[in-house]
Amino acid sequence: MAYCNQDDILRMIPLEELTELTADTGDTPDPEVVTEAIAKADAEIDAYLGTRYVTPLSPIPAQITFLSADMAIYHLYTRRSLAPVVRLRKYEAALAFLQRVAAGEVVLEGMGGEPPGVQHQGVEAEAATRLFSRDTLGDW
């Protein structure tokens, strides 16, 4: 299941812009091109989040829907040419956010902090008897 859809993208850019980015012929957006861009964005999201969560995410947090749409728009722009600076910055911000989630610095809304099934094990350590101290060092 995709994290966003064409309607989510159309909330961020006008229909004419989406058509220009996707349609090789015709006056409507090419749904296959849109789906491909979304799949690319979602694969990136899963690659980052897979270290902390079971992917694909379900339910989908609103944060991820917005990120997926922003990243898909970036991929649509790079399909035609260079992305505008604002789209590049949004894409980079999305990647930075995903890196923070993967590092455990940020928790996704409603998802908790650990993937199901993760169990933490304690660490036990033993040290050898101390050979030298301030009291015994002078004896040598």
Image (cartoon, rainbow, N blue to C red):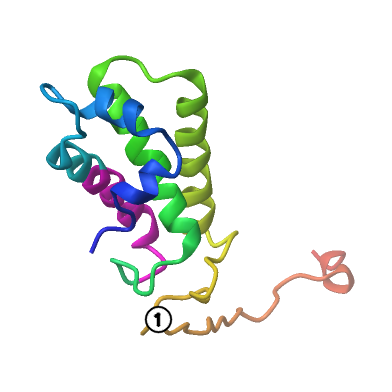
Q: Which residue is drawn at 12% across and 22% down?
A: 24
Residue for badge 1: 118
Q: Give the range drawn in magenta.
A: 38-53
Predominant SS of the magenta segment = helix
Indicate the secondary structure of the residue bearing disc 1: loop
Q: Which residue is drawn at 50% across and 19% down?
A: 85
Q: Where is residue 18 in the image (x, y as percent from the top left)?
A: 30, 31
Q: Residue at x 12, y 41 (%)?
A: 32
The amino acid on which the numbered mark 1 sits, given as a three-letter code, is Val
Front residue (pair 117, 6) = 6
Front residue (pair 126, 19) = 19
Front residue (pair 112, 65) = 65
Q: Where is residue 51 in the image (x, y as percent from the top left)?
A: 37, 63
The quadrant of the rendering that contains the C terminus is: bottom right
The quadrant of the rendering that contains the N terminus is: bottom left
- Disc 1 crowd, CA 10 A, few/some/many (<14, 14-19, 20+): few
Q: Where is residue 107 in the image (x, y as percent from the top left)?
A: 56, 66
Front residue (pair 122, 14) = 14
Residue 12 magenta-highlighted: no
Q: Which residue is drawn at 50% across and 34% down?
A: 90
In this picture, residue 24 sits left or right of residue 88: left
